[in-house]
Image: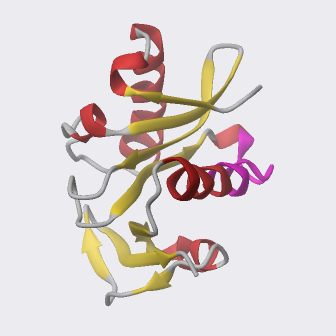
């Protein structure tokens, strides 16, 4: 099971379906959060994901700088429920940072992190730059990573 990295245009119809299905399972159903899951940013993003038997088991999207933020950003980070605690999130985030630095040649990354994951992102070098705020009834903080 290798990581796949694709632009929106490179994704197959089935991959788009499976990505949106799993993102909806996590963010809308699991977290009981009604929000605009299909927000237009997927069209601009690089999609990093891992599959097992056709199911998306881990996923995130990388937005280029000057799309959502001035900085490059990572969003929609998910790991399928039954794969949590296996190190997939750490592996995926490490891979994403490497891609951003080495392939996209970006030096700063901004994220909107759910507050309970603030320490997790901090282990990668992300620093909190905002107070806690509510978005879709979930506590969040803004964080920035800068290549040292």
User: Where's the C terminus, which quadrant?
Assistant: bottom right
In the visual, does 14 lie left or right of 39? Answer: right
In the visual, does 60 lie left or right of 94? Answer: left
Viewer-closest of 14 and 3: 3
The residue lying at 47 percent from left, 28 percent from top is 6
Viewer-closest of 105 and 116: 105
Viewer-closest of 97 and 36: 97
**Magenta span of residues:** 83-92
Q: Main secondary structure of the magenta part?
A: helix
In the visual, does 70 lie left or right of 76? Answer: left
Task: Determine the residue located farthest toward the right in the rendered image.
Answer: 86
The residue lying at 49 percent from left, 77 percent from top is 146
The image position of residue 85, as x and y in percent, is 77, 54
The image position of residue 127, as x and y in percent, is 49, 85
Q: Is residue 104 above or below residue 48?
A: below
Q: Quadrant of residue 143?
A: bottom left
Q: Is residue 63 above or below residue 137?
A: above
Q: Is residue 87 magenta?
A: yes
The image position of residue 87, as x and y in percent, is 78, 53
Task: Determine the residue located farthest toward the top in the rendered image.
Answer: 13
Q: Is residue 124 above or below residue 55?
A: below
User: Where's the N terminus, which quadrant?
Assistant: top right
Q: Is residue 78 magenta?
A: no
The image position of residue 53, as x and y in percent, is 71, 14
Q: Quadrant of residue 2?
A: top right
């Amino acid at each position: 099971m290798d990581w796949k990295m694709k632009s929106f245009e490179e994704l197959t119809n089935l991959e788009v379906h499976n990505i949106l299905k799993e993102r909806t399972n996590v963010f809308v159903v699991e977290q009981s959060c009604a929000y605009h899951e299909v927000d237009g940013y997927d069209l601009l993003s690089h999609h990093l994901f891992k599959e097992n038997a056709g199911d998306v088991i881990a996923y995130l999207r990388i937005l280029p700088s000057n799309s959502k933020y001035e900085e490059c950003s990572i969003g929609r980070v998910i790991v399928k429920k039954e794969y949590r605690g296996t190190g997939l999130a750490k592996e995926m985030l490490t891979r994403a940072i490497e891609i951003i630095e080495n392939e996209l040649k970006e030096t700063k990354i901004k994220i909107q992190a759910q507050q309970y994951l603030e320490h997790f992102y901090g282990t990668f070098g992300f620093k909190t730059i905002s107070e806690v705020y509510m978005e879709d009834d979930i506590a969040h903080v803004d964080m920035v990573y800068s290549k040292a």
